[in-house]
Image: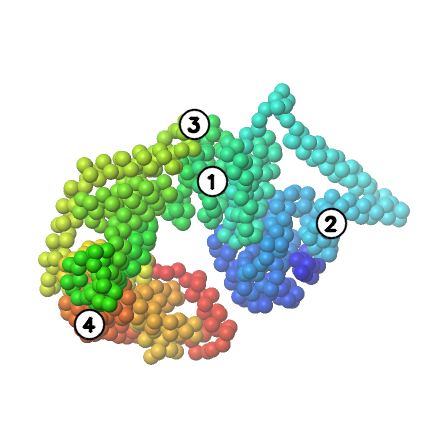
Amino acid sequence: MSEMITADLVDLDLSADTKEAAARALAERMVSAGRVTDLEGFLADVAAREAQMPTGLDGGIGIPHCRSEHVTEPTLAFGRSAAGVDFGAADGPADLIFLIAAPAGADDAHLTILSSLARQLMNTEFTDALRAAGDPAAAAALIRGDRTPAAAGSENSAAASEAASSEAAAGSTAPAPDTKAGDVKAGGAGAGDASAEDASAPAPGAPDARPFRVVAVTSCPTGIAHTYMAAESLENAGREAGVEVTVETQGSAGFTRLDPAVIAAADGVIFAHDVPVREKDRFAGKPTVDVGVKAGINRPAELISEVREKAARGEVTSGSAPSTPVERGGEASEGYGTKLRKWLMSGVSYMVPFVAAGGLLIALGFAIGGYKINKAPSVMDHFIWTQGDSWAALLFQIGGVAFAFLVPVLAGYIAYGMADRPGLVPGFVGGSIALTINAGFLGGLAAGLIAGGVVMAIQKVRIPAAVRGIMPVVVIPLISSAIVGFLMFVVIGKPIASAQKNMTDWLNGLSGANAVLLGALLGLMMCFDLGGPVNKVAYTFATAGIAVSDPSDSAMKIMAAVMAAGMVPPLAMALATTVRGRLFTPTERENGKAAWVLGASFISEGAIPFAAADPLRVIPSSMVGGAITGALSMAFGATLRAPHGGIFVVPLIGNPFLYLIAIAVGTCATTALVVVLKGLRKPAPGATTTGPADGKAATTAEAKQPVAA
């Protein structure tokens, strides 16, 4: 194993004035050392990591870092800037810059070394020694741990004293302040040692008092630097405050679980993380502070004070941290409307696999056994191995069981998005009641929101310490299920069931121009964000209509229109890259080949790379083609019982020939619009050239473009 940093990887006079220039200067040293194989590719990975969260730290430190397939072995480059480089830290520019490069599959030993460095950055003696280092070899030795900060300080003091003596011997009349400075420095070290002893000593008058105990978990997206720096910072702050802090670092090198006895004895919990905490339920029933990892680095004392205050008030969590799955994936400033949409989409995303599996099984049952297969007796009572009808009945009945989970899963995971795991039980209970009272899809939505709200309200109640441990497994499921059940059965169930029936009757009554307009609207929605929230709303609306044993003809027409429109964008992009390849980059042309299969399989996300690179031309064009296809499908009276499958379920489609014509017309319309709009501008960069560099540059550019929504 090569040394992680050598003198060649140190620049003590870094002249860069931006973080990009600093990263490039240090990365070039890695390339020269044979540690990085592709400079631009590596810098793109560094920039992507930097975009997730600034890597500047208080105290004049910048730690750009990433995992990259272009790194051959874990490597560290160090630069010292006199002017400072802005890495986004609150206290200003960084003068000490560490570029940390880890391979995509770095082993635990290397990552442990990197984690040790990250902890050292919280040591002021270490950073002071780096600022005073006189040559690259000394700085590299200090970072590797071959030289201690104290030894480096002594050498610097000795060198200064020797210089002063030389000046005196030469007859210099200038005073020699270095001896005094050395005394002051030595005195400072002594004072530091005394302070350390004082901090570790028991408080006067209470030598046997039990200290306040905190367990903490730290983690960051790459798990290389911030994870361990936050741990070191929290531990240092704990020592200064007389608090016993034990940290579990969930980094790239894996993690060692805290002893359950340590967790049980803890008085509070601190989560400083930017990725979900693993096995979070271990910390149930304790006062909890949940923040980002940089807060653990920059203000550990505040976090410890906050968790102590929560413990004093008896404020605890019911089994998870205050943040929910939805909140962990968003911004703290998100409004209620945004959160509501995400709560609903959380339920929909978990429901869709049940829709696909159940719907396709039911559709296959109809295809094999005919449309009277729903009248077949239970296969438990009648199943003949050699009869096709028995197999058709089996597929149909399995699909029916899968479909029966749709509304409970929708409600359960809406509640999960709001209140985490404690919301699952009342959510599933409420969803099952919605089925029982024929409240259907609307009832499931209401049940999920009610269940999540009830659990969130219970979690805010101050709980006696004696019952905190049983809150997540007994108290919350019991109380929340009882409340949700009462509301669904007695209060709001009947109105919701009536609304569901009215909506179904309205859909069944659609015909002529109204049906065509509905098809166009659903087509627009399917192509607006290509698998995003609006797309999922239209898809869920369609699947809810067929999620019954005997769906209406209107519901099956809606399902057909939705699937047809969703196939248009990727098919159109594939066709456009075929007929006018010069308008697209080499990477887009490669994506176009895959888009044929994705579009044919009803995977709208196949058009996302094109929309990301050119949203103003691709998305409006897709919406036009989707609207045309949706309207034509409704006008042709095409029906579909399967909720997914694309062209592979054409035998299950009513009026399949006209259905395919609707898809072809919409695809051609979108292709024509995209070609015309792209032809009005200059060719995309790299569109007329080939080669790995062009493809790579295109990929990077696409990755940085946001998807229009």
Asked if residue 416 can be seen in this view, the reply is yes
Q: Hey, what amino acid is under mark 4?
A: Pro
The mark that comes first in sequence, 3 or 1, is 1
- What secondary structure is marked by label 1? helix
Q: Which residue is mark 2?
A: 147
Q: Which residue is mark 1?
A: 282
> Could you tell me residue 40's position as x and y percent?
54, 66
Q: Are marks 1 and 4 in contact (CB under 8 Å)?
A: no
Q: Which residue is mark 3?
A: 466
Judging depth in this view, the residue of 642 and 177 nearest the camera is: 642
The mark that comes first in sequence, 4 or 2, is 2
The mark that comes first in sequence, 3 or 4, is 3
Q: Tell me the quarter of the image containing the N terminus.
A: bottom right
Q: Which numbered dot is residue 656?
A: 4
Q: Are marks 3 and 4 in contact (CB under 8 Å)?
A: no
Which is in the foreground here, disc 3 or disc 4? 3
The mark that comes first in sequence, 1 or 2, is 2
Q: Hey, what amino acid is under mark 3?
A: Ala
Q: Residue at x 15, y 52 (%)?
A: 503
- What secondary structure is marked by label 4? helix
Way the structure is coloured: rainbow
Instruction: Classify 575 as above or below 502.
Output: below
Which is in the foreground here, disc 4 or disc 2? 4
Which is in the foreground here, disc 1 or disc 4? 1
